[in-house]
């Protein structure tokens, strides 16, 4: 198949760990590579956010990235991109009119709007990665999404051919938006089990037990709860990987906020900010941890626990969103309530004191990651959805 992925703000070429660069970037890159490996012709369309970028980039992984003009050629917050989607769609429309793909797969709601506007008769599959209704519920007035986001996501549920949800919790939310059960499939995010392995380089360690938080420095990720939980584990350090480059960590507002919380809690000497790291270095940081934390208030999916499990590390995660699917409580890790640093601290103290349980969690996590979440399986399952969508389209055409 000739497959076009659309990811308006999350380029597969972007550095991971920025405010708007995270799991979706990894997902799109890995899915594109996996589909290409399965013999498909794959193109990813993403917004041009730098005037120096070439129009097209061919990657060694076998797919092509096209930088689509839409608004100023510079980085913009993703919540400011809606007004540029008509231009994005117009460019897609011209491309697809000349060289139509077999199927379009949109990633994120704004990509869906642009894809539907540009696709005409082409089948469109949608992955939301995050839903405005969930974000609004948890962030309230702090939600910076466009005010009509939820209504537009509801309209997409009625116009796209099929939705690929990344977890079972998302299916429930999509049903509330009016999506029928026969138009949604669950295909999770994945992990590169050839890169994230128990054996390999390990980042430098101190003499303390190490708790690791990996990802963007945004408030909903719950790093502040992890900082407060340090009070319950006086022999441990918390290493935060992600955010600005190491030479700009001290000036970052979220770093300053977390350091103030650490000072108030009396744990400032055990909080370490590594800053953003190269994607190739992430496995070494994961292997350096005794326990990996993923403690967001809410999470559409969450790739960090998969990476930790694939590296054989015990996980402590909040029981929200996709984390409830990926982390098997009492088998690959422990699930805790969100925004409860006291409970988190108690669970961490018990787990750090139990070497055998951490080892068992690690072994079970490796097995689960390799069986259920390897990218080759994710790509195969996604391809199966594509074929069902195209077959259904052909059946409808025959019946007409």
Image (spheres, rainbow, N blue to C red):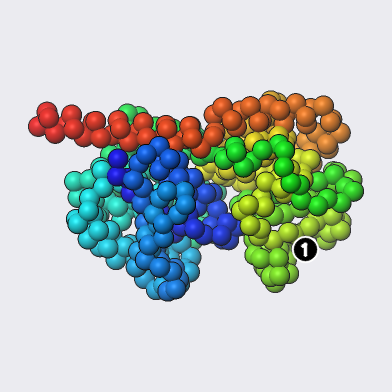
Can the viewer see residue 373? yes
Q: Looking at the rendering, which quadrant does residue 40 occupy?
A: top left
Side of 335 where 138 appears, left or right? left
Q: Which residue is mark 1?
A: 260
- The residue that appears at 37% across and 56% down in the rendered structure is 45
Q: Residue 163's x, y, as percent?
A: 36, 39
Q: Residue 244's x, y, as percent?
A: 65, 65
On screen, 202 above or below 145? above
Residue situated in front as seen by the camera: 306 or 252:
306
Residue situated in front as seen by the camera: 335 or 370:
370
Residue situated in front as seen by the camera: 373 or 53:
53
Q: Residue 137's x, y, as percent?
A: 51, 48
On screen, 348 above or below 44? above
Quadrant including the N terminus: top left
- The residue that appears at 37% across and 66% down in the rendered structure is 55
On screen, 106 above or below 53? above
- The residue that appears at 61% across and 53% down in the rendered structure is 279
Side of 34 where 267 appears, left or right? right
Mark 1, other Cα within 10 Å: few <14 / some 14–19 / many ≥20: some
- The residue that appears at 73% across and 59% down in the rendered structure is 274
Side of 365 where 22 appears, left or right? left
């Amino acid at each position: 198949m000739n497959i076009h992925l659309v990811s308006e703000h999350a380029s597969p070429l972007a550095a991971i760990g920025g405010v708007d660069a995270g799991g979706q970037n990894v997902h799109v890159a890995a899915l594109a590579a996996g589909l290409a490996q399965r013999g498909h012709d794959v193109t990813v369309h993403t917004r041009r956010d730098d005037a120096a970028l070439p129009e097209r980039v061919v990657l060694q992984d076998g797919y092509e990235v096209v930088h689509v003009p839409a608004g100023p050629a510079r980085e913009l917050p993703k919540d400011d991109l809606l007004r540029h989607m008509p231009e994005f769609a117009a460019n897609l429309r011209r491309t697809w009119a000349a060289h139509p793909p077999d199927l379009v797969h949109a990633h994120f709601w704004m990509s869906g709007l642009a894809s539907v506007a540009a696709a005409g008769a082409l089948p469109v599959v949608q992955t939301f990665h995050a839903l405005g209704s969930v974000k609004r519920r948890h962030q309230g007035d702090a939600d910076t999404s466009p005010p009509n986001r939820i209504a537009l996501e509801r309209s997409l549920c009625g116009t796209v051919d099929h939705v690929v949800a990344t977890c079972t919790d998302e299916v429930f939310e999509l049903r509330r938006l009016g999506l029928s059960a026969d138009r949604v499939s669950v295909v999770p995010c994945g992990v590169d089990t050839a890169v994230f392995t128990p054996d390999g380089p390990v980042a430098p360690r101190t003499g303390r037990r190490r708790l690791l938080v990996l990802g963007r420095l945004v408030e909903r990720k719950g790093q502040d709860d992890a900082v407060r939980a340090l009070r319950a584990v006086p022999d441990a350090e918390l290493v935060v990987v992600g955010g600005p480059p190491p030479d700009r960590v001290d000036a970052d507002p979220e770093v300053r906020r977390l350091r103030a919380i650490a000072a108030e809690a009396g744990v400032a000497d055990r909080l370490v900010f590594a800053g953003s790291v190269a994607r190739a270095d992430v496995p070494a940081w994961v292997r350096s941890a005794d326990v990996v934390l993923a403690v967001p208030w809410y999470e559409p999916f969450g790739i960090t626990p998969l990476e930790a499990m694939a590296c054989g590390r015990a996980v402590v995660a909040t029981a929200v969103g996709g984390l409830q699917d990926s982390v098997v409580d009492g088998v690959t890790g422990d699930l805790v309530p969100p925004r409860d640093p006291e409970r988190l601290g108690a669970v961490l103290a018990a787990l750090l004191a139990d070497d055998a349980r951490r080892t068992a969690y690690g072994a079970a996590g490796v097995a689960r990651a390799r069986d259920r979440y390897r990218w080759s399986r994710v790509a195969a399952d996604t391809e199966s959805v594509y074929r069902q969508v195209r077959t259904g389209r052909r059946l409808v055409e025959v019946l007409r």
